[in-house]
Amino acid sequence: MVFRGSTTRARKTANLSPQPWRWSHPRVLVEHPDEAAGLAIASCLRFAGYAVAICPGPRGHGPCPLTGPAGCAPAHDADVVVCSLGYEHEAAREVLHELRTRYPDTPLLVDVPSEIDADLRELLDGCQRLPASATPEQVVAAVQGLSGHFAEEGSPSA
């Protein structure tokens, strides 16, 4: 049965809410404030065999759970985190700082502009960088490039 137009309506009313993982390794958390871009990245990662959760990051709806005492379950259980939050905003930098502090062994792939300030450069030390506006295919290639990390967890299966 085909429902014409239902996909568009569903996307407009969808409210992404990260939930605990339902799949096994390897797990990728995609943090992206643009819902369509986050879904495109997630779709490519899923097609490549990864379990994926999506989070819009801090959007002004109160503090990000990651920065609170309870932390964030999807970030806690992720094998890799892809961050595309726009680091000109202090709230996005705070999220990146918390990810680095709370989960120091979890690889971070961070979408960064070519021009960055000294504070952001220091915060990004040790993170894998993606070019600003990386395509979903570039993100998948970068995640696949972390194969040494996933070898411990188990390799992705399609």
Image (cartoon, rainbow, N blue to C red):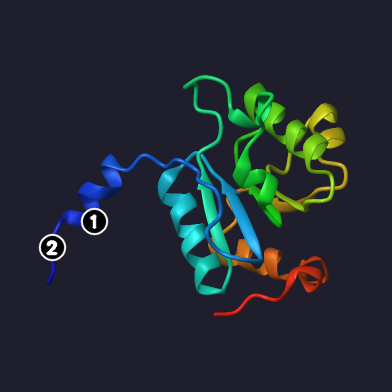
Quarter of the image with the C terminus is bottom right
Q: Amino acid at mark 1?
A: Thr
Residue 81 percent location from the top left of the image: 67, 50
Residue that appears at 61% across and 35% down: 86
- Sort mark 2 into few (<14), some (14-19) or many (20+) by Cα contacts within 10 Å: few
Residue 127 percent location from the top left of the image: 81, 48
Residue 129 percent location from the top left of the image: 75, 51
Q: Verify CB contact (< 8 Å) between mark 2 and mark 1.
A: yes
Q: Which residue is mark 2?
A: 3
Residue that appears at 21% across and 47% down: 9
Residue 47 percent location from the top left of the image: 50, 73
Q: Which residue is mark 1?
A: 7
Q: Quadrant of residue 72?
A: top right
Q: Quadrant of residue 117?
A: top right
What separation in Å lies between label 2 and label 1 (alpha carbons)? 8 Å
Residue that appears at 69% across and 24% down: 69
- Sort mark 1 into few (<14), some (14-19) or many (20+) by Cα contacts within 10 Å: few
Horizontal relation, residue 128 to residue 53: left or right: right
